[in-house]
Each structure stands twice: as structure tokens, then as C-alpha cells.
Image (spheres, grey):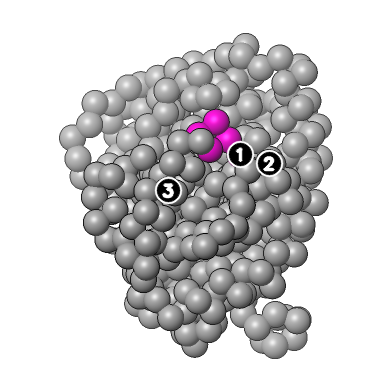
């Protein structure tokens, strides 16, 4: 009801603004990395496995894609990420040393549960879930679990569940690295310090809302949008495009920017807003030349840069700068402005933000 919403117009907006609290709660009390964070048997399981298979749907799948970059980079363990509804029906080659990781806000998504069961029947005994509901079927079915503390999420389009999943998955990457003796104590403490700073960093990003509203008024008049990211931020571009589709009904696609020349450049005209996730990471120079390719065809760039990315506004290049450069955790920060952009665009178009047409919060049938 209205009382619960407080100053917010929709649950989605409220949930976007709850992310500092949700991340703080999800990471509460974590001062050291230890396998027991994921359950009693985690020490033994993490020693045994030598690869990870992530299964999820929707927004949770994009969290999984981000985790692949983190786990391979920090823990040096190979990771595959599969859409649950595809994995459950295809012939695959099981590896008994895989750790099956399901990611699910609700813990009740039928395809993800079925994919887990399928993996187990193929002879992969070890499973872990990142889940927001401790009493869910998923938590009961998995050997190990990390419960995110996003709290109840009402908006159909997932927001705080996603960023808390990312925080939990980053912890998993650190824990797997430690289990394989690939994390020094100094590295561990540096990463924990960054994790614990997240709520403050997110609060600063939320303060960009007025600038994002100005962009949303432009977007509300468009029927198509392209989202670009590279590396760690490609899944974030995918999530940004999904958010816009889900609630504003604008057709949006995401591409890893290096693929532009293999197709989507053909779509670029001055009518095509191109959202670019552009923190100062190792691929920033590559991304800048991808942005030039868009500008040369008249595309309008809407760039989410950060404190360190040397990108300045110019004709057709709009820039919002996130206050900090956040290194490996940057995907968590860069998600927030994309949520706000989708939210305010939908608001300007007058759609039913919390209950978009044809979609359900949790898909418990196939
Ligand atoms: C539905 C929701 C999405 C969610 C997906 C997976 O499509 O609308 O927001 O990402 O299900 O849900 P889960 O609960 O498994 O994360």
C-alpha cells in the first residue's frame, strides 16, 4: 500500500533505492573469506571441484555471466553459464567435478529447478545456490547456499535482487580462489574493503537520478535503443537492455561493443540512442573507438563513464559520470543508473512499471 511505498511512486523505484541497505545486509559481518559462508560442507566441496556450471534465467542469468568473468579472473577456474531452459533439454557432456551454481531470486523458477535436477541426474553431485528466499525449493535442493538479503522484491523487473546476487557471486569468486590457494591475505583484505564500501558507493550513484531523468525524457520518445559494454560490463549492458524492454516496451538490444561492425552498425541512425557502459577498465580505449564508429553514423551516445574514464561530452555524446572508479566491482555500480534510466523512461511513457504486461514475477511453470 501507499504507506509502504513512503516517498516512492512504485515498488521498483523503492527497491532501486534500497540497494545500499540490501548490499549492506547481504555482506553483513563479513570480515574474512571462508568456505563456511556457503555451508558446512563447502570446504570439502570447493576442494573437490575444478570447474563451475552456472544455471539461471532472466536477470539472474546475467548475474551468472558477470560471475564467469570474476571466477575465471580471480579463482582461475573454468566457468560455463547456461540458460536453464536450454541446458535442461540439450545433450551435454557432464563433468562430475563441476560445481553446479544456480542463481535465483525466488528460488522457485521451474526451469532452473529442472536444470539443477537434470545436472544431478547426469552425475554432478555438487550444487550451490545464490538465492533470495531461504525457505525456497532451490535452497532445499542444493547442497550449499548463500542467501542474499535483498528482502522481498515486489517489482516484476528485478533490481536489488540482481545487485545482491552480484555481491554474493563476487564472494564466491574470492572463496573459490582461496580454496585453490590463489588468494593472498592482502588481496583478500583489499577485496573485502571494496565490498564493504559498496553501500556508500551506491548511495553516491543514486544521487545521479536527476541527470538520468533528463535522459529518460529523450528515451521515452524512441522505439529502439542499443546498449554497449565490453568485458565485465557486457552482461551489465544486457541487463540494462532487459530492464528497458521489460518496463518501457522499447525494443532494446545489447552488444559487446567489438561486435558492432558485425551487424548492429547497420541499425545506427540519429534516431538510435546508444547507451554505453564505459568505466575506466582495461578495454576503455577499445570502447572509445567503438563509440567513434557509432558517432560516424550519426548515432547519439549516452555514456555512463566513471571518475577516471577520460570521455568528455560533445555533440551527440552525452556523458553521466559515476563518482568513483570501482575496479572489479564496477558492474554492481554501473547497474544502478541503467535501472533508473529504464524506470524513468517507463514512467514518462506511463506504463505499469511494477506489473509490466505479459510478465510474471516468478515463473513456476514451464
Ligand atoms: C522472471 C522475472 C525476472 C527474473 C526471472 C528469473 O522472468 O520477471 O525478473 O529475473 O524470472 O527469476 P528468478 O526468481 O529465478 O531469479
Q: Percent from the top left, x then y, of residue 16?
A: 64, 65
Q: Residue at x 69, y 72 (%)?
A: 210
In the rendered structure, the answer to whether residue 135 lies left or right of residue 157 reads right
Q: Earlier in the sequence, mark 1 or mark 2?
A: 1
Question: Which residue lies under the disc numbered 3?
Answer: 292
Residue 59 visible in rendering: no
Q: Percent from the top left, x then y, of residue 354?
A: 52, 78
**Ligand 1: does it lie within 8 Å of the C-beta at label 2?**
no
Mark 1 and 2 residues: CB-CB less than 8 Å, in contact? yes
Q: Which residues are magenta?
A: 280-284
Q: Residue 185, located in which quarter of the rendered image?
A: top right
Residue 189 visible in rendering: yes
Quarter of the rendering occupied by the N terminus: bottom right
Q: CA distance from mark 3 to mark 1?
A: 17 Å
Q: Residue at x 37, y 54 (%)?
A: 296
What is the secondary structure assignment of the residue under circle 2?
loop
Question: Which residue lies under the disc numbered 1?
Answer: 280
Q: Residue at x 73, y 23 (%)?
A: 188
In the rendered structure, the answer to whether residue 312 lies left or right of residue 298 reads right
Is 90 in front, or is 189? 189
Amino acid at each position: 500500500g501507499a504507506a509502504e511505498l513512503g516517498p516512492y511512486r512504485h515498488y521498483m523505484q523503492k527497491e532501486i533505492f534500497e540497494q545500499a541497505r540490501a548490499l549492506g545486509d547481504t555482506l553483513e559481518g563479513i570480515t574474512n573469506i571462508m568456505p563456511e559462508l556457503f555451508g558446512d560442507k563447502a570446504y570439502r566441496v570447493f576442494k573437490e571441484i575444478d570447474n563451475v556450471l552456472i544455471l539461471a534465467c532472466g536477470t539472474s542469468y546475467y548475474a551468472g555471466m558477470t560471475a564467469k568473468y570474476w571466477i575465471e579472473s580471480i579463482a582461475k577456474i573454468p566457468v560455463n553459464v547456461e540458460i536453464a531452459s536450454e541446458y535442461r533439454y540439450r545433450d551435454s557432456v557432464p563433468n562430475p567435478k563441476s560445481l553446479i551454481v544456480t542463481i535465483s531470486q525466488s528460488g522457485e523458477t521451474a526451469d532452473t529447478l529442472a536444470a539443477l535436477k537434470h545436472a544431478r541426474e547426469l552425475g554432478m553431485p555438487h550444487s550451490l545456490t545464490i538465492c533470495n528466499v531461504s525457505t525456497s525449493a532451490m535452497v532445499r535442493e542444493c547442497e550449499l547456499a548463500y542467501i542474499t538479503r535483498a528482502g522481498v522484491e515486489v517489482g516484476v523487473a528485478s533490481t536489488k535482487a540482481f545487485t545482491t546476487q552480484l555481491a554474493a557471486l563476487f564472494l564466491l569468486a574470492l572463496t573459490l580462489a582461496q580454496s585453490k590457494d590463489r588468494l593472498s591475505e592482502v588481496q583478500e583484505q583489499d577485496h573485502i574493503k571494496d565490498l564493504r564500501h559498496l553501500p556508500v558507493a551506491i548511495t553516491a550513484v543514486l544521487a545521479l537520478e536527476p541527470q538520468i531523468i533528463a535522459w529518460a525524457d529523450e528515451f521515452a520518445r524512441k522505439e529502439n535503443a542499443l546498449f554497449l559494454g565490453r568485458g565485465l560490463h557486457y552482461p551489465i549492458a544486457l541487463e540494462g537492455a532487459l530492464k528497458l524492454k521489460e518496463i518501457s516496451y522499447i525494443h532494446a538490444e545489447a552488444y559487446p561493443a567489438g561486435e558492432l561492425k558485425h551487424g548492429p552498425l547497420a541499425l545506427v541512425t540519429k534516431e538510435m540512442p546508444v547507451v554505453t557502459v564505459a568505466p575506466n577498465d582495461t578495454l576503455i580505449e577499445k570502447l572509445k573507438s567503438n563509440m567513434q564508429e557509432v558517432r560516424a553514423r550519426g548515432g547519439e551516445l549516452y555514456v555512463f563513464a566513471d571518475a577516471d574514464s577520460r570521455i568528455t561530452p560533445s555533440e551527440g555524446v552525452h556523458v553521466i559520470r559515476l563518482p568513483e572508479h570501482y575496479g572489479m566491482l564496477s558492474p554492481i555500480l554501473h547497474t544502478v543508473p541503467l535501472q533508473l534510466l529504464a524506470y524513468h523512461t517507463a514512467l514518462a511513457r506511463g506504463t505499469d512499471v511494477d506489473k509490466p504486461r505479459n510478465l510474471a514475477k516468478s515463473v513456476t511453470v514451464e
